[in-house]
Structures are given as structure tokens and as C-alpha cells.
Image (cartoon, grey):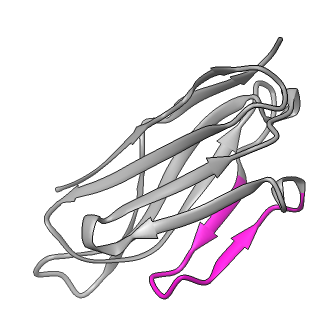
Amino acid sequence: QVHLVESGGGLVQPGGSLRLSCAASGSIFMVNSMGWYRQAPGKQRELVASITSGGSTNYADSVKGRFTISRDNAKNTVYLQMNSLKPEDTAVYYCNADIRVRFSTRNYDYWGQGTQVTVSS
């Protein structure tokens, strides 16, 4: 079994910063791509940023230049550094990972439980 555990959300003023972390643990053979999604009230879940095992990154246009995704492959952990936060960044942020579990020939998609980010004065 595999678990993704997120941390780092909270309340921050506009213009502030937060850093989210997500650690994958369990019966893992290999972690492929990892990413962050977010869902605001009344809206669909959207991709914020993703990163491959080789370090290639992809960002939503709305966060380019403000957010940075990174990972530590030795720790199976992905990070999201969020700077210059805006009220419209308020959402529940979910970690996602594509993982090859041990003794399996398939990759599986896993999600974290979500962490609330609120940007407000």
C-alpha cells in the first residue's frame, strides 16, 4: 500500500509565501511523475505544476513565475514553493504521484488527502 502525506498549507496574506511538501511512502518500487493540483470552491480540480523523475517541469499559466515545483527522489518527496500569493490561489491543494509499486508491472495513480491554502488579508 502507498500513502501520500501533504503538509505546509495554511493562512497567508496576499504577497506572502508558503511551501507545500508531499511525501510518498509504502510499497514503492519507483515514483514517476509527481504533481500538485488544486480545487477552489465551486470549481474543477486543476493542475498547478508537475515534475518528472528526471526533473522536467510543467506549470499552469496562472502560477508561472510565482510557484516552483521540485522533488527529492531519495525521499520520494515533492515540494511546491509558492511566492507572491494571490487571493485567487485560495484552494485545497492535492499532491499526485504516478507510482510503480513493488512486485507489480503496472503504474498506479495516487492522491494525497489535500491541504488548505487560504490567501487573505
Q: Name which quarter of the figure residue 93 lies in.
A: top right
Magenta highlight range: 47-61
The residue shown at (81%, 61%) is 60
- When the figure is inspected, residue 119 is found, relative to residue 92, above or below; the finding is above
Q: Residue at x 45, y 82 (%)?
A: 53
* Magenta-colored stretch includes residue 60: yes
Q: Residue at x 60, y 62 (%)?
A: 69
Residue 94: x and y in percent read 54, 44
In the picture, measured across the screen, residue 29 lies left or right of residue 93, that is: left
14 vs 70, left or right, is right
| Residue 87 image-quadrant placement | top right
Does residue 74 show up magenta in the picture?
Answer: no
Q: How many marks?
A: 0
The percent coordinates of residue 88 (x first, y second) are: 87, 32
- Classify 46 as above or below 70: above
Residue 34 locus on image (x, y percent): 49, 67
Toward which corner of the image does residue 51 lie, by quadrant?
Answer: bottom right
Task: Please provide percent x and percent y for residue 7.
Answer: 42, 36
Rendered view: 48 above or below 117: below
Quarter of the figure that contains the C terminus: top right
Task: Tell me what residue is drawn at x 84 percent, y 61 percent.
Answer: 65
Residue sitting farthest toward the top: 121
Determine whether, in the image, residue 103 is placed left or right of residue 29. left
